[in-house]
Amino acid sequence: MYRLHIEIRGLTASFRVPHMYKYHRSLPLPPYTSVVGMFGAAIGKDMATAQEIFKSLKLKVGIAGSYAGGCNDTWRVLTTKNPENDVVERQILFKPIYHILFCGDESPIRFCERAFSYPVYPLSLGRPDDIANVIVHDISECEPENLQILSNTVVIGVPSAQADESLFDIDKPINTGPCTLLYRLPVHFLFENGFAYERTADEFRDFTFIGNHPITLKEQVKGFKIEINSLAGELETLNIPILEI
């Protein structure tokens, strides 16, 4: 198996949880469909075309990363059902750094490397104004290994994990960062008459987003270990599970 590691940085990001209406909470990491959308922007295709190409190439992805902070921003939107302007509150993530792995055969991975090195359209992190900078790292040929300790990443399903007693030590509180979150999210859309904005989700998966505090899974998952430079400038190892979709 071949693996491509790309690093995505931005000033802001916001990935709205689909079923939230008045308060647009953001997922801590780009969901699977957002990664497919970035792939589409890189190759210059709309979402409907991009997801079919992505599927035909049999690409798999792994997603990890973190952000420096966040805030809530108030927006006025014009809904189609209500002619009046409606006010919503949206969570904005500040200075996100994401690490995305693309895995598959050599030819599709080389194709991804060229696309992200010279993207046709700008990549964004949720909203069109959340422009991203992309760093393309090396391609390597390696097989997935078993991972058990995870943080700042996302896995498919609802894994069983051992609870760390330090989470409940009120005498020595720690900064756990974003908590572990479970969401049922779309992984595929149907498009009406080929129009990219008229879409309906027709396939879903459960995703567990794991925060800053490492958790130990009771059952190992397949993925890769990569070395990255932390915000403090130190070299650290990041465990990134592969999403089997």
Image (tube, rainbow, N blue to C red):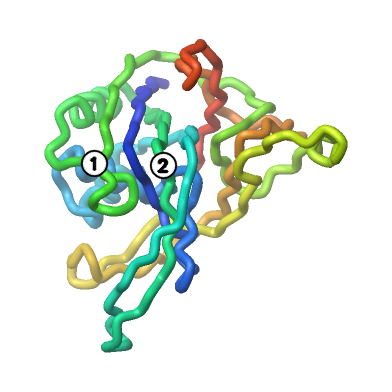
> Amino acid under label 1?
Leu
Pointer 1 residue:
123
Q: Is residue 35 left or right of residue 216?
A: left
Pointer 2 residue:
94
Mark 1 crowdedness (10 Å alpha carbons): few <14, some 14-19, many ≥20: many
What residue appears at the point 41 percent right and 32 percent down from the top-left corner?
97
What residue appears at the point 41 percent right and 71 percent down from the top-left corner?
88
| Quarter-of-image position of residue 139 | top left
Q: Is residue 17 left or right of residue 215?
A: left
| Quarter-of-image position of residue 8 | top left
Q: CA distance from mark 2 to mark 1?
A: 17 Å
Mark 2 vs 1, N-terminal side: 2
What residue appears at the point 45 percent right and 61 percent down from the top-left corner?
203
Which of 19/144 is in front?
A: 19
Locate residue 171, reporting x and y percent.
87, 36
Label 1's element? Answer: loop
Label 2's element? Answer: strand
Which of 17/169 is in front?
A: 169
Locate residue 96, reporting x and y percent.
41, 37
Locate residue 135, reporting x and y percent.
29, 24
Mark 2 crowdedness (10 Å alpha carbons): few <14, some 14-19, many ≥20: some
Which of 42/110 is in front?
A: 42
What residue appears at the point 51 percent right and 33 percent down from the top-left corner?
242
- The quadrant of the picture occupied by the N terminus is top left
